[in-house]
Amino acid sequence: MIINWPEKFARKGHELFLSGLPIALHCHHYNMNLQKTLESSLGSDGTLLLYQAAEESSYAGFTSFLQHHPKINTTKSKLELASTSYQYCGLGIINFTQIEPEGGRIVSPHSHHVTGWLAKFGKRETPGCFFSRGWIAGALAVIYDKHIGYYRVDELQCKMTLARECVFEVVIA
């Protein structure tokens, strides 16, 4: 099944919708300043907020999208959809080839958040892809028919620390 992505996007005035759900698109200036503010003012609570917001958002988005497209019903096709939508929405490239219902590893060689962070703030000492981690957790929960919070996603390597790629480990929480 081929999805015509431009047809899935709708605009009403200044609002954007993907398959009927409102979405927000921001440049790296907004995203990275938001992350930096949350990290510096709230510490681990701020990074958890980013993670949980991304998890809830991707969970709701994937649930809605798959309800509108019942022919996308195999795990493989859902993982391909996740990879494609991540890229189409400008978040980067993500590879789900080493993932199973019990967890696994996910690799991202390119990321909007990494590029934005490095451009604005330079190298980090610790991994910083909190949004991507949450997004992955939410998408996988839908793909494997689990609840929000079922998966925990940790970042083992991060391009923000100048690693070659971002590597995420998915485990059952």
Image (cartoon, rainbow, N blue to C red):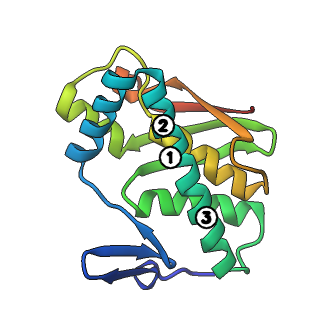
| Front disc: 2 or 3 | 2
| Disc nearer the start of the sequence (2/3) | 2
Hey, which quadrant is residue 158 in on the image?
top left
Kind of residue at disc 2 = Leu
Contact between labelled residues 2 and 1, with CB atoms less than 8 Å apart: yes
Residue 98 pos. (x, y %): 69, 41
Q: Residues within 10 Å of mark 3 (few under 14, many from 20)?
A: many
Nearer the observer, 38 or 62: 38
Residue 60 pos. (x, y %): 60, 62
Q: Quadrant of the C terminus?
A: top right
**Residue position for label 2:** 49
As drawn, the label of residue 53 is 1
Nearer the observer, 164 or 171: 171
Residue 117 pos. (x, y %): 27, 33
**Residue position for label 3:** 62
Nearer the observer, 157 or 38: 38
Kind of residue at disc 1 = Ala
Q: What is the distance, in whole Å, between disc 1 and disc 2 at their CAs? A: 6 Å
Q: Is residue 120 above or below residue 85?
A: above
- Write the residue at 60% across / 73% down: 65
Q: Is residue 145 left or right of residue 165?
A: right
| Disc nearer the start of the sequence (1/3) | 1
- Write the residue at 43% across / 85% down: 7
